[in-house]
Image (cartoon, helix red, strand yellow):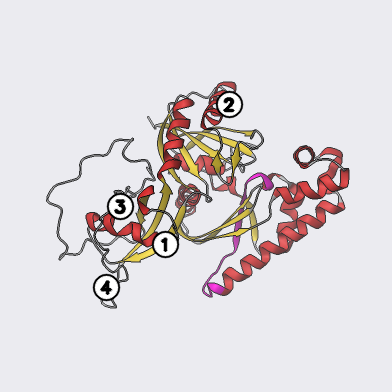
Amino acid sequence: MAKTILGVDIGSDSLKLALVAGKIVKKVVAVPMPHSLVKEGRVVSIDAMGDLISSTMRENDIHCTEGAMVLPDEVAYVRNVVMHRMTTEQLDTNLPYEFRDYISEDLSNFYYDYALLDAVEEPKSAAKPKKKKSKKSKEDDPLGMGDGMSETEPVEEEAPAPVPTLPTEEEDGMHLMAAAVPRAVIEDARNMFHKAGMTLVKAAPAVCSFIPLIRSAEEASGESGEYCLLDLGYKSIRMYMFRGDRYIVTRELETGLSFLDEVIAEAYGVDAHLAHTYLLTNYDECQSKEYCQNAYNNIAVELMRALNFYRFSNQDSQLSDVWLCGGGAMIAPLRDAITETLDLQIHQASELLPGGKIAKKGNITVQASGIAMY
């Protein structure tokens, strides 16, 4: 029997849960996030969030003891890197230094993880570890990011100088997707899940939540291609680019549904919180008003510019399809504006889920579903 895991995606605007058994999504739930409980991707009150997860599970008849969490982009660093072929021990020592230009604080305050993108053999000249590493417990492996990913050891204060990481012309090198996450974030997540009556068994950056969905879709179609996942979020819109299941880059647009709240608030003379309720409930058919249509068009044009820049930077790109997820994917006029502006096929991201669309809220909860499958 497939293991059942609850995927948890904590956004600034809503909490998303997805109960997944193997690759089958059993149930999805999305509930509003209490005001100011999440700021800049960080949970303000661990106890309050744990209680919210627990009460949401109880109210929706969800029973699960193991959970997986989407780590927001604000707290996770993700990079594609090329390094010399080396043993796991050598990689554990060197990987943290790949983030020294991105992380200003002490490198030892972070957990590090990686996925080998190219299947290469260990170099014959590399020294083999004399002893196998002991099997890590769930407590020792906080970034259970799966599929060949393993947590590196913390950087010691007197860590040896890293070996050069750029391969020579004679060496192909190792192509990795590497991640770094603050230890405090993982400890908070463990405590939060414990408060909700669960054990945290997996935690991975948001980009990882799309990988199993892309793999599932390619297995079903027998074809591989380029993927653009547009997360139409509350604070911002993020554009995740893939070639097959290989992550390429993320582009962030500093606009989101909060921009629509502002124009609705101005039109009705209400505060932003009430305006957001108007938007979600389509009060007075506000989603179809001219001021909202203008806002949709502005968002669509910004997306077009970002895509054009990506194509300019990737001359061999043959991108033809875009998948929409997040709260904005539920707003039909916004979807229409994006469809009319972009010269691409527009899809609902829930179509990538095994079996296709599973629920009305499938697009909002697609990352929660994906992280549970990872």
Looking at the picture, tell me which residue is in the foreground, 189 or 23.
189
| Residue 56: numbered disc | 2
> In the image, what residue type sits under mark 3?
Val
| Residue 245 shown in magenta | no
Circle 1 sits on which residue? 80
Question: Mark 2–mark 1 contact, CB under 8 Å?
Answer: no
Q: Amino acid at mark 1?
A: Asn
**On the rendered structure, is 134 left or right of 212?**
left
Please tell me whether residue 2 is drawn above or below residue 165 in the rendered image: above
For the residues bearing labels 2 and 4, Cβ distance under 8 angstroms:
no
Please name the amino acid that badge 2 sits on: Thr
Secondary structure type for disc 1: strand
Q: Which residue is mark 3?
A: 155
Q: Residue at x 87, y 47 (%)?
A: 267
* Distance between mark 2 and mark 1 Cα atoms: 36 Å
Q: CA distance from mark 2 to mark 4?
A: 52 Å
Q: What stretch of residues is rendered in magenta?
A: 313-328
Label 3 vs 4, first from the N-terminus:
3
The image shows residue 320 at horizontal and vertical percentages of 59, 64
Q: Type of residue at label 4?
A: Glu
The answer for how far apart the CA atoms under marks 1 and 4 are is 18 Å
Check whether the beta carbons of the residues at disc 2 and disc 3 lie within 8 A of each other.
Answer: no
The residue at 57%/65% (across/down) is 319
Q: Could you say where residue 45 lies in the image, as x and y percent from the top left? A: 55, 33
Where does the N terminus fall, quadrant-wise? top left
Q: Earlier in the sequence, mark 3 or mark 1?
A: 1
Q: Nearer the viewer, residue 349 or 99?
A: 99
